[in-house]
Amino acid sequence: TIKAVFILDNDGRRLLAKYYDDTFPSMKEQMVFEKNVFNKTSRTESEIAFFGGMTIVYKNSIDLFLYVVGSSYENELMLMSVLTCLFESLNHMLSVILESDPQQVIQKVNFRVDDGGLTEQSVAQVLQSAKEQIKWSLLK
């Protein structure tokens, strides 16, 4: 099982974190753990680390570090599968967000627009759909 998923910036500050058990019950303990993991992994080229009795797989892209944490007995390939799904989903979504033409954004997320053009409701639906896709990729 996955103990945690977190994303840090290139300075080791938390951007997003989700803990699935009580290994680190307080926010302070979580932040200390994340900082220690970042300090251990930020200067290496590997994709796996063993720290504090846990298996940690990670990837970095430009200025983001994505981590998936499991127990020391967890299969590294399964953890890497979760990490790859999260990484590729974020890459796809961020490339869509960087698009400046609303029609192109809608086309890239496979959303059809009525002949009337882009509406407030359709933008909200696109954002909700993206949110749901991320949520389901994290829960898998």
Image (cartoon, rainbow, N blue to C red):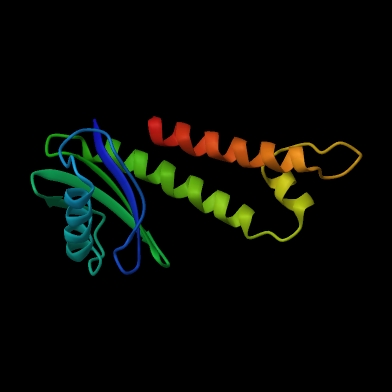
Residue at (16% x, 60% y) in the render: 36
Across the whole image, how many numbered discs are drawn on residues? 0
Residue that extends furthest to the left in the rendered view of this protein = 53
Residue at (58% x, 40% y) in the render: 130
9 or 96: nearer the eye? 9
49 or 125: nearer the eye? 125
Residue at (19% x, 52% y) in the render: 28
x and y percent of residue 51 in the render?
A: 12, 51
Decide: is 94 above or below 9. above
Decide: is 78 above or below 62. above
x and y percent of residue 91 in the render?
A: 51, 53
Q: Quadrant of residue 112?
A: top right
x and y percent of residue 21 in the render?
A: 21, 33
Image quarter (top left, top right, bottom left or bottom right) of the C terminus: top left
Left or right of residue 59, residue 129 in this image: right
Left or right of residue 137, residue 111 in this image: right
Image quarter (top left, top right, bottom left or bottom right) of the N terminus: top left
x and y percent of residue 25 in the render?
A: 18, 39
Q: Quadrant of residue 94?
A: bottom right
119 or 26: nearer the eye? 26
Q: Quadrant of residue 13?
A: bottom left
Left or right of residue 127, residue 10 in this image: left
